[in-house]
Image: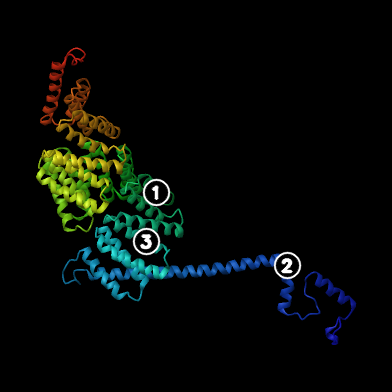
Amino acid sequence: ALRKEPERRYASVERLAEDLERYLQARPVLARPGTLGYRLGRFVKRRRWAVTSVAVLTLFAGASAVALTLQARRVAVERDTAQQALSFLVDVFHSADPSFAKGETLTAREILDQAVPRIERELREQPEIRATLLNAIGEVYVSLGFFEQATPLFETSRKLRRELFGERHPTVAVCLHNLALTAQSRGELGAARDLFHQAAEIRRGTLGSEAPELAASLNGLGDVLRLEESWDEAESLHLEALGIFRKALGPEAPQVAKTLRQLGDLSDDRGDDRTALGYFERDLAIRRAHNGENSPEAAESALRVGLSLNAQGRLEEAETMLRWALESQRKLLPHDNRDLLRSMNALGQLLANQNRFEESVALYYEVLNVHRKTPERNRIELASCLNNLGMVLFAKGDYLAARPFHLEALELRREIFGERSRYAAQSLYQLGQVSLGEKDFEGAERFFQEGTEIARESLGPDHPNLGHYLSGLGKVRLETGRPHEAADLFSRAWDLLSSSLGQEHRLVAGIENRLGVALLEAGRYAEAEPRLLHSNDVLSHHWPKDDPRREMLEESLGRLYREWLRASGPGTPSPTPGRFD
């Protein structure tokens, strides 16, 4: 209104009033230059909420576009990395073609051995691809059972990925998980536990609490805790993993089957054979449906079912299952495959239980020869094979041959699991058996006593398997003229094992028979009679008609009634009438 230039002044009072009205409505006034910035400023002031909303949406759209662009770039990088890795592997395997390898046929192990130095040499300037390939080849080594070769590859891959992505990255967790597997195979349970725990923590933090990758590490950690006999913690982890897998992948996924198998192994270690069999049968059903009837996965699951049936004394069913598994694996797998060796080991155990010792020994020697050639592959399974071969030789009566196998197994197990592990206790028990067979009662009692103490510590006072150790001690006490002590030990052993296996199991019946004999030796005839009668009936059902042990059963009963009759007098119960018919 006060400008000197006429063209810039209000033409009338009415125009001034109109501009004041415009100002109050936050609209552009005529007295100011109509620049775009000025007009936009007034528009924003007039429609503040609408403009704010549009601005937020615009910013969100822009941010989304940036995020999508970055994601697309990451996907492109990952795609390019995978493509380069794949191209490299194709080239490696192409060079293994006999036409390029001077007519020689290379094994998978030889191809991998050649690939590693090429990766280090040709991909030195591409650390991400190098890390990916080294980890992948390490996983193949693990699948072939070459854990020692895999370990340095996982270590290098972890180092590269830490440098590229930082400590808490999912790809670092992959390497930690794989390193845990190799540590476990060497029996380094403490290291394996720590590595699985680190992998699980990273995966939970980066991938979330419902990620299948997390469940895999929880299962690994649970398996180590099972071996360390922390069964409650192990069960909690396996159940969490089972829930994750079922929700993420569905109830019939292979990962669900594997978790069920691990829960079965846990139940088996706890001495709960019936629960273990239930888990193993569900695992087998999923494997057959998902992988097919004649697949390595189904055969491995059938192995667990067969072992569980064998433990329950269902020998015919167990043999059918184990032979089916072994035949499938012989067709599908190389002769030194770990799963095939486990099935041979299991069948050897079953044949020994059926007194088919020559067949059993032949199988065990075949397995042992493979383990001897590659002792670095799995020392735990080597120790198991040594133990089982020693047991069969003992059952044959070849005590001299059995002893060195049990001593070697004991040394290995002490190195792997520690001086006072349940696995060391198992070997001590077997050495007690051998010493007892050799009539070295002092040595037998020493081995049995130490084994019993360790088993009570590691398993707990109410674990069914403690019954075996108490029975071993009972046999020494019976042989050395201490029948009352022997009877107490056999009675406790029978209570523990019958609670798990049932009173009709042949092992339980064998302990009941020894309890009856101890009571007979102690002159407690009325207590001895029902024990001897029941165990006689059960064992006669399990043993062939020409088995010489049947005569021993009858002799024990005959002796019971003869001594009972001689001891009859005032205040002494008489034998049951008609027992001499």
Q: Earlier in the sequence, mark 2 or mark 1?
A: 2
Above or below, 420 relative to 488: below
Residue drawn at 29 percent across, 40 percent down: 456
- Which residue corresponds to mark 2? 47
Alpha carbon separation for disc pair 1 and 3: 19 Å
Above or below, 277 relative to 341: above
Relative depth, front residue between 371 and 437: 437
Amino acid type, label 1? Leu
Residue drawn at 26 percent across, 69 percent down: 115
Amino acid type, label 3? Val
Q: Secondary structure at mark 1?
A: helix
Amino acid type, label 2? Arg
Q: Quadrant of the C terminus?
A: top left
Q: Nearer the viewer, mark 2 or mark 1?
A: 1
Any part of residue 356 in sight: no
Q: Position of residue 51 (x, y in %)?
A: 68, 67
**Residue 207 location, quadrant:** bottom left
Type of colouring: rainbow
User: What crowding class fits label 1: few (fewer than 14 Cα within 10 Å), some (14-19), or many (20 or more)?
Assistant: many
Q: Earlier in the sequence, mark 1 or mark 3?
A: 3
Q: Position of residue 460 (x, y in %)?
A: 32, 40
Residue drawn at 27 percent across, 38 percent down: 466
- Is residue 542 toward the left or the right of residue 213 in the image? left
Residue drawn at 38 percent across, 64 percent down: 172
Q: Earlier in the sequence, mark 3 or mark 2?
A: 2
- Which residue corresponds to mark 1? 237
Q: Position of residue 117 (x, y in %)?
A: 26, 72
Any part of residue 421 in sight: yes
Q: Nearer the viewer, mark 1 or mark 3?
A: 1
Disc number at residue 551? none
- Which residue corresponds to mark 3? 174
